[in-house]
Image: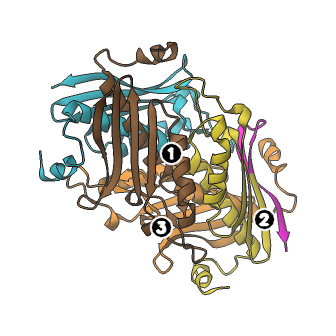
Chain colours: A yellow, B orange, C cyan, D brown
Amino acid sequence: MDRIEKKARKYFGTEVTARDRAIFEGAITLGAIFHQFTGLPLTKSLIPLIQETIEKTMSVQPFIQKIKVKINEDEVRDYAHTYDYSVLSGDILELEVISQYENARVHLGMKYVEDLDYPLMFIKKIEEI
Amino acid sequence: MDRIEKKARKYFGTEVTARDRAIFEGAITLGAIFHQFTGLPLTKSLIPLIQETIEKTMSVQPFIQKIKVKINEDEVRDYAHTYDYSVLSGDILELEVISQYENARVHLGMKYVEDLDYPLMFIKKIEEI
Amino acid sequence: MDRIEKKARKYFGTEVTARDRAIFEGAITLGAIFHQFTGLPLTKSLIPLIQETIEKTMSVQPFIQKIKVKINEDEVRDYAHTYDYSVLSGDILELEVISQYENARVHLGMKYVEDLDYPLMFIKKIEEI
Amino acid sequence: MDRIEKKARKYFGTEVTARDRAIFEGAITLGAIFHQFTGLPLTKSLIPLIQETIEKTMSVQPFIQKIKVKINEDEVRDYAHTYDYSVLSGDILELEVISQYENARVHLGMKYVEDLDYPLMFIKKIEEI
């Protein structure tokens, strides 16, 4: 553990494991992405740029290894006139986040679940590496 | 586990424990609060209202039991003239979140750590109840 | 014009009138409200608190005299279970803003217009007072 | 005026001129940018991507002709360790927006004014074209 992480580690309970921590860091990023980018104006042609920007900016958060963003193109309007564009919301956004702390790697995700009418965040897999 | 939670549970890996889940849900809320409310205009006299609103709105998120928000009053400007107000940011915001999933209860927090020049999020305590 | 406003005024073109300025300040606040609060979790019972918080926080912006927020209750979910809540978006939000600069007072608004499938912002009335 | 704009125009007072409207639309976008992107994590190397994304996404808003975003690189941290990154805020953000409605073109801006300790938004120039 480096000198900087030692300073941070003091704020965590001693019972907190690498697994706990990896889940914690990945989940923060899921919540952060949703609430930072909801409301963003978008059109079909801007989707690749927006996906890249979310992936790269939110990957600077601690212990995030990878982010994959998918905006559901079929639900995005096509800019046929002045007022014809969409706004980013949870029901058109799909996320994959991989976080890692020491030897614990966690795969997390978000997707809109029709059955719940809810953009559900979830832990897909927890690995020891 | 109720009928609705069963539907959600299918998206989680089978290795995910109550402890994992409680950490996950609390951490989402920490990330969400930061990115939802950063940028909010505020003055000293509005602090109690804003604290209450953050606490109550973000407590509707899944498995959040309690949120306590503290905005550092000493750092908030006093509205002596038209342009004299503050904007909510991580260095004046302190958070306590308690999440619970089944028998696992987790105490999480955020506070600005001068030593890191960073609004650190952390897990204070994990309880089995 | 007070000393502080003189400092700000230097950044504006000399052709900018009180009418221009009042429109400008009110419109900023409309854009600000939409993009600050979109994504906020809410339930029916939280509507009065959220309305009050938007009104009071965004009224600290320069030259805003009054804000009236109406969240369309019929479109807000009722919290029957863990995942059953809404998220604030432009189609359930109605705004009235009054801005004033010197003798110019402007009434602005936002409402979802079904015909455009768009949360339209508009200038209702410009008064000289 | 096209068919769609006619539908929108009904919500505006009859006294609203092209000049009023161009100011209105540009100002909305200034307020929107500030409150949408405040809180975004960033490092020096991400500045060009973020600038482009703000410019392109916010240009889909009605009657916006051009947006130029400048993030003050000197104030952005350099990612020497896990917690060493910045968060977008008004004091490191400079904006230029050009809006146009019919024959009225308006140049608007935002920059941090040290003298006011405030990220001031302003109307630089109003043109008839």
Query: Chain under label 1?
Result: D
Q: Position of residue D47 (x, y in %)?
A: 53, 59
Q: Report how far apart the C-alphas of labels 3 and 2 lie in the structure.
A: 30 Å
Name the residue beneath numbered marker 3: D76
Tag 3–tag 2 contact (CB < 8 Å): no
Q: Residue furthest front?
A: D129
Q: Residue at x 53, y 72 (%)?
A: D78
Label 2 Cα crowd, 10 Å radius (few <14 / some 14-19 / many 20+): many
Q: Residue at x 49, y 14 (%)?
A: D2
Q: Quadrant of the rendered structure where residue B99 is?
A: bottom right
Name the amino acid, label 2: Val
Q: Chain of mark 3?
A: D
Residue at the farthest right position:
B14
- Magenta residues span A110-129
Q: Badge 1 is on which residue? A: D55
The secondary structure type at the circle numbered 1 is helix
Q: Which residue is mark 2?
A: A106
Which mark is nearer the camera, 3 or 1? 1
